[in-house]
Image: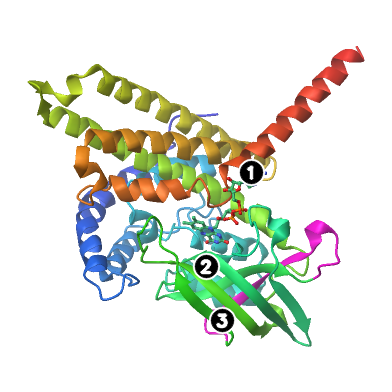
Amino acid sequence: MQFDSSDRVAELQERLGAFMDEHVYPAEPVWVAQVRNAPSPHIHPPVMEQLKAEAKRRGLWNLFLPDAEYGAGLTNCEYAPLAEIMGRTQIAAEACNCSAPDTGNMEVLHQFGTPAQKEQWLAPLLAGEIRSAFAMTEPDVASSDATNIAMEIKRDGDSYVLNGRKWWTTNAMHPNLRILIVMGKTDASAPTYQQQSMVLVPIDTPGVEIVRNLPVFGYHDPEGHGEVQFTDARVGAENIIAGEGMGFMIAQARLGPGRIHHCMRAIGAAERALELLCDRADARETFGKPISHNANVRDWIAESRIELEMARLLVLKTAWLMDEVGNQHARIEISGIKFAVPEICLKVIDRAIQVHGGGGVSDDFPLATMYAHLRTLRLADGPDEVHKLSLARQELRRQRERRKASSSD
Ligand SMILES: Cc1cc2nc3c(=O)[nH]c(=O)nc-3n(C[C@H](O)[C@H](O)[C@H](O)COP(=O)(O)OP(=O)(O)OC[C@H]3O[C@@H](n4cnc5c(N)ncnc54)[C@H](O)[C@@H]3O)c2cc1C
């Protein structure tokens, strides 16, 4: 495992850093004002299209996709420092066409899409012309166990007909949303992991209704998290992805990169929070000395620095494993970072909020939205407990094998 950046990545880091300084940070207050002053919270702020054009012009586009024919052709290890830089703001990943859930959906189409599906949906997604959503979670069943998913996807002649309800469908309110990848059951009598399939459902399909947006801690994210009703929604049979019964396999393939990208960006957000913490603690005085002179604040700074280094190392080791042995073989490590990294980053952001006093929970600083967003990561893409369950199962298996091997010596 190598810790220094290749020449190409170092150059990209520099180019991305310059883009952040010259365009993204100055656009942050503009983006906030455009969202806040709009008649509906679900607008696509015009400044985002300007940022996207600039990112494209600078060759900072689709950096997440490892296939050089479609994306930047970077390994996971190479992408990590770049995703971290983008994670410093709420808007940079979208500006570079590297934001969830589109990245995961593009990966699904890239890996499993037919040539026609790629032409119709992957091409405009890669160009940043449209947005997509991934609809798996359902209000009526505990969806952290995906075998519970109940949406019915029934074959009827040359069509599939969908009936059921989803929620937390991120991007549902985005004005550029055109396509949903929907997971549901095509055969409830098949073996457990072959009952599920995924189909492409254009958002304008009759029978698809966005019922409402779900706020997060009271925030209405512009892209939205929708509750979506499907009533006899009919799509062509050619809209199935990779065939019937492949839903679980695709979900596993999709979630690996998505999860590590979240972790990479979370570290970027927490690094920025630590910077803000230090700036504020040096700048303000109480009882005759700067806040940074208090021992507890110094402890927080030291602990934050070392915890972020540990989180980054774990993410890099996982990225390296994904590059070396594939996403499937790195799945336990992916589960490990998926619960460890948000927890660490939330702790750092919480300390930064505390040092900012009342300002920390206001929207004069990015800390409150950072915290709200990162807190959802302990649920989205699988709650902490389910990831810990996978880790514990693997560890118990390993320890039982060790005992068996030593008893047969
Ligand atoms: C902001 C946000 C965005 C999201 N975006 C999307 C999206 O785009 N598409 C999509 O399909 N979904 C999305 N989700 C949904 C998310 O993936 C689910 O909320 C998550 O998988 C948990 O499913 P659930 O809500 O049904 O919780 P449940 O399955 O009901 O679980 C509830 C809780 O039970 C506990 N639990 C579950 N199993 C165990 C266990 N084995 N041991 C111990 N405790 C356990 C956990 O604490 C868990 O949080 C999003 C969620 C949020 C908050």
Lower position in the chain sequence, tag 2 or tag 3? 2
- Mark 2 or mark 1: name the one nearer the start of the chain: 2
Specify whether residue 198 is painted magenta.
yes
Q: Position of residue 104 (x, y in %)?
A: 55, 58
Kindly state the secondary structure of the residue where label 3 is placed: strand
Query: Does 371 appear above or below 279?
Result: below
Label 2 vs label 1, nearer the camera: 1
- Which three-letter amino acid code belongs to the residue tagged 1? Val
Report the side of 246 relative to 263 (left or right).
right
> Mark 2 is on which residue type?
Ala
In the rendering, at what x and y percent does residue 399 appear?
77, 23
Residue 187 x/y as whole percent? 81, 70
Q: Secondary structure at mark 2?
A: strand
Q: Is mark 1 within 8 Å of ligand 1?
A: yes
Q: Quadrant of residue 82?
A: top left
Identify residue for label 2. 133
Of the two numbered discs 1 and 3 on the same chain, state the one appearing first in sequence. 3
**Is residue 174 among the parts visible in the rendering?**
yes
Q: Secondary structure at mark 1?
A: helix
Read off the magenta span.
Answer: 187-205
State the quadrant of the N terminus. top right
Residue occupied by mark 1: 386
Q: Which residue is mark 3?
A: 208
Residue 67 vs residue 173, the one in the foreground: 173
